[in-house]
């Protein structure tokens, strides 16, 4: 796919990740199409850094990828005895202490967590393969626009592992426990049609329309007042963990803040 941010000066451009900012819209692009944007610890650290470098003006973050595949998942080099240069191999990690292993996985997960921040709306533009870590990266975003050639798959269980990059919580929330379990333990592909029908994706479009559709969606998000979007996102994200009565209370409190703000009345 052609890059819509190629004329912008990158805020960050390293280890297969490029961050550009155009006023209220930031774009994070995976930039290693030759390897189908396979992921590594270095790429995860770059994604974490991208989140930390977002200017306060940014309201929408678009996640996209160059090439025919969004991300083919974890680079297979991770499964070799040598692993990546300068990185602990999986075998090294397994031989470490419980605390060291937990800390390392937690560091990897940071690349997948900041997309849920309440002050931004994140949109994944997904084409081609989104497998394993690629699937989980798409799940890290608030919204997903997919090309009609998309193929999601969670292959970790098939490899004797589990999805550990924060993808299980949003997957169950989107498609339900039974379907999420079936997707994970079979490792099968989820097509664009199924993704839309089950709520995994917001919309599917021809691959040539993917970037334009995401741009239109970002513009629609920006049309609403920022503080109202922030409050609404917080309400919806917390709804699953609240009782009905607690959610009613949260709505009242959020609306009171909005009314006072609009009326120019301080707390």
Image (cartoon, rainbow, N blue to C red):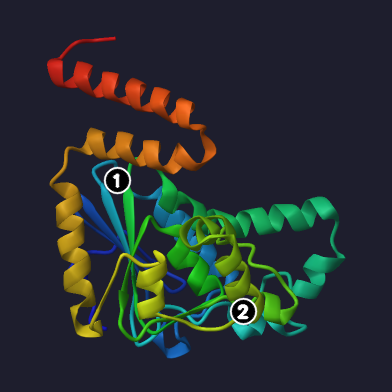
* Vertical comparison of 148 with 243: above or below: below
Per the image, label 2 sits on a secondary structure element best described as loop
Residue 86: name its quadrant: bottom right
Q: Is residue 225 visible?
A: yes
| Residue 25 location, quadrant | bottom left
Q: Is residue 4 visible?
A: no
Q: Which residue is mark 2?
A: 155
* Tag count: 2
- Asked whether 69 or 246 is in front, the reply is 246
Q: Residue at x 35, y 21 (%)?
A: 253
Above or below, 39 against 128 in this view is above
Using the image, tell me which numbered label, if any, was put on residue 55. 1
- The residues bearing labels 1 and 2 have C-alpha atoms spaced at a distance of 35 Å
Which residue is at 20% across, 84% downward? 208
Horizontally, is 51 left or right of 97 in the view? left
Quadrant for the C terminus in the image = top left
């Amino acid at each position: 796919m052609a890059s819509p941010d190629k004329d912008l000066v990158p805020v960050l451009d390293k280890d297969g990740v490029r961050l550009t900012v155009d006023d209220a819209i930031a774009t994070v692009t995976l930039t290693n199409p030759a390897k189908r944007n396979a992921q590594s610890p270095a790429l995860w650290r770059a994604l974490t850094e991208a989140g930390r470098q977002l200017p306060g003006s940014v309201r929408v973050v678009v996640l996209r990828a160059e090439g025919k595949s969004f991300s083919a998942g974890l680079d297979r080099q991770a499964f070799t005895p040598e692993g990546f240069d300068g990185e602990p191999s999986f075998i090294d990690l397994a031989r470490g202490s419980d605390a060291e292993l937990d800390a390392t996985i937690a560091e990897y997960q940071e690349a997948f967590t900041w997309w849920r921040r309440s002050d931004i709306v994140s949109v994944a533009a997904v084409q081609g393969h989104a497998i394993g870590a690629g699937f989980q990266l798409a799940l890290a975003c608030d919204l997903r626009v997919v090309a009609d050639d998309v193929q999601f798959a969670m292959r970790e269980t098939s490899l004797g592992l589990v999805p550990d990059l924060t993808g299980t919580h949003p997957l169950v929330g989107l498609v339900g426990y039974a379907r999420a379990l079936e997707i994970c333990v079979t490792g099968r592909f989820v097509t664009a049609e199924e993704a839309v029908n089950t709520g995994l994706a917001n919309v599917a479009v021809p691959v040539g329309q993917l970037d334009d559709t995401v741009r239109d969606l970002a513009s629609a998000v920006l049309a609403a007042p920022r503080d109202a979007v922030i409050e609404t996102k917080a309400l919806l994200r917390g709804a699953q963990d609240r009782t009905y009565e607690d959610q009613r209370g949260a709505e009242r409190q959020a609306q009171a803040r909005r009314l006072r703000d609009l009326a120019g009345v301080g707390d």
